[in-house]
Image (cartoon, grey):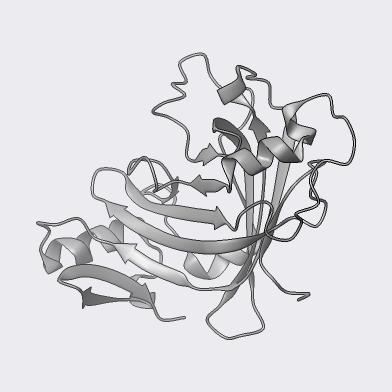
Amino acid sequence: MSNESRIYFLNNPYPKGHGLEEFIWSGRLEPNTGIWFDLHLRTKHYYDEDESGDSEEVSNDWNAKIVWANFNSCILSSTFWNDNAGILIGTKRKKLDFKKIVSEVIEADKLPRPKSFDINEDPPFHIYLLGHDDCAEHKIQFTNSQKKGFFDIKWKGKIALAYAGDYEFKHDFDAKIYQTQFEGIKIPEGISKMEIEDLLNHFVSEPDLFVLNEQEGKLKLNNII
């Protein structure tokens, strides 16, 4: 499929990349900070499309199919391990303009990181690749898909094989996600509808583009573009 969502780990043993088992793009409202974007990606098994094994000797884990096979698949996510990760996309000073997200590249966790950076607490995204590794230098671009109300996403970044004790960002990933929808903005419990309206006015440039719904007993703001 020419438009199959895939992620590529550049120069690894799988040049055709890896298909996605799941992908979720969602938002959440944090009253003290603003609107956050969350992305969650899980690949299919690394070896699903290639079971040939290593055909030659390799010098490191990144190039060894047998090492990739030991770890099965990748999770790249702001939600799987840490509910406080993600990208702050709408604040009082710079409100979320949902119509304009297709006109800019969103960047997060730029390198070099500040000295105060805590690898366990501060990353917007965590990654399980060849163990619990590290990722940074994210560049995320949204474009309108051919299908109304859907988006295509390009997501690039750097990887360090931290699980193996290598903290240098030597490797790159490049994800291409097609025809995905925004899952809406999650609302924390205990906030009244009036408070939600107030906060939406603080953090979103066009609050009328969102409608408040209740799903499975929880409130959520869904976009109506």
Q: Is residue 125 left or right of residue 105?
A: left
* In the image, residue 224 above or below residue 47: below
Q: Is residue 225 left or right of residue 56?
A: left
Q: Is residue 178 left or right of residue 193?
A: right
Numbered label tally: 0
Rendering coords of residue 2 (x, y %): 78, 74
Rendering coords of residue 81 (x, y %): 38, 41
Q: Is residue 137 left or right of residue 126?
A: right
Q: Measuring 41% from the left and 26% from the top, which residue is drawn there?
A: 120
Rendering coords of residue 146 (x, y %): 67, 83
Name the residue furthest right. Answer: 56
Query: Camera-side residue: 159 or 130?
Result: 130
Q: Quadrant of residue 19?
A: bottom right
Q: For the N terminus, which image quadrant?
A: bottom right
* In the image, residue 162 above or below residue 131: above
Query: Camera-side residue: 130 or 54?
Result: 54
Q: Measuring 40% from the left and 69% from the top, which residue is drawn there?
A: 183
Query: Camera-side residue: 48 or 37?
Result: 48
Q: Measuring 36% from the left and 40% from the top, which residue is drawn there?
A: 82
Q: Quadrant of residue 218?
A: bottom left
Q: Measuring 56% from the left and 34% from the top, which residue is drawn there?
A: 109
* In the image, residue 165 above or below residue 40: above
